[in-house]
Image: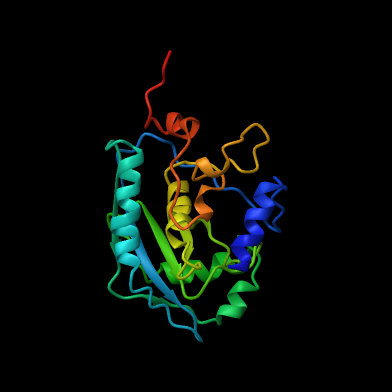
Amino acid sequence: DAVLAKERERIAAKGPVVVADYAKPTPQPHGKKAYTLQVVRVSFSDRMCHAREIEKSICTVVADYFGRVSRGTFVLKGRVAAEGVALACTRETFEGMPLRSKGELETLGEALKKVDRSGADGVALVLAGGVGKEGGALWPHRWEVGGIDVVLLPEEAGGRELGIYAHEIGHLFGFEDQYDDPRSEVGAWCLYGKGYAEKEPSGICAGCLEKAGWRPVVT
């Protein structure tokens, strides 16, 4: 996948993240023992989202991943909405919106009005098609929309869906990226370094686990 290959090169070079209209959301406080995630398929006017394996990918594989890396102290409860949501715009129009721009905010706000969020801590929107260009609204990311914690995920990612899903969903729990931190050299050893860009997500480094309270601090 050319988009992910380019991103791996950028991470390796530790280049700065430069995104128009970028506003980094405040991370959720760590300490939650469980998180309920509402998963919703999102189609465009010119492209349907099928994501037939999404329930298994998020509700089983990614949920098991977080249970394992937390040593059983945390539970991700995923549930997939029976009915998806259709956006009025084309995929190209949505991708042309800058990341976290007013246009994206308004479009997602309308979509979330159609989502039953009862009992959910956050929402994962699985967008039809592959990973969009960096800096555009289709780039996988977490955002807060109208007070709702949301992650945008691609339907397809060249076989690297699980790593991207785990990485972005973990942002909802408070995990922060390490690949642009000059003090961090976690590389592919951490999901928040380069470990998300592989076909199977890597583990999470000790520093991230300690912040989450998922690893005892040795004194």
- Residue at 50% in and 75% down: 129
Q: Nearer the viewer, residue 177 or 61?
A: 61
- Image quadrant holding the N terminus, namely bottom right
* Foreground pick, 30 / 50: 50
- Image quarter where the C terminus lies is top left
x then y, percent, for residue 98: 66, 65
Q: In percent of the image, x 36 and y 40: which residue is there?
A: 69
Q: Taking 18 as reference, is 113 left or right?
A: left
Occupied quadrant, residue 155: bottom left
Please report the residue visible at 47 percent of the width from the left and 51 percent of the height from the top: 167
Q: Residue at x 68, y 35 (%)?
A: 182
How has the structure been colored for display? rainbow
- Left or right: residue 38 versus residue 195 is left
Work out whether residue 87 can be spotted. Answer: yes
**Residue 109, x across and y down, in percent:** 48, 66
- Which residue lies most toward the bottom here? 46
Q: Nearer the viewer, residue 146 or 5?
A: 5
Q: Is residue 76 left or right of residue 150?
A: left
Report whether residue 147 is seen: no
User: Residue 40 versus residue 163: which sits nearer the camera?
Assistant: 163
Which picture quadrant has residue 178? top right
Percent across and percent down for residue 47 are 48, 83
Give coordinates of residue 64: x percent, y percent.
Answer: 30, 49
Q: Extreme top residue here?
A: 219
How many discs mark residues in the rendered view?
0
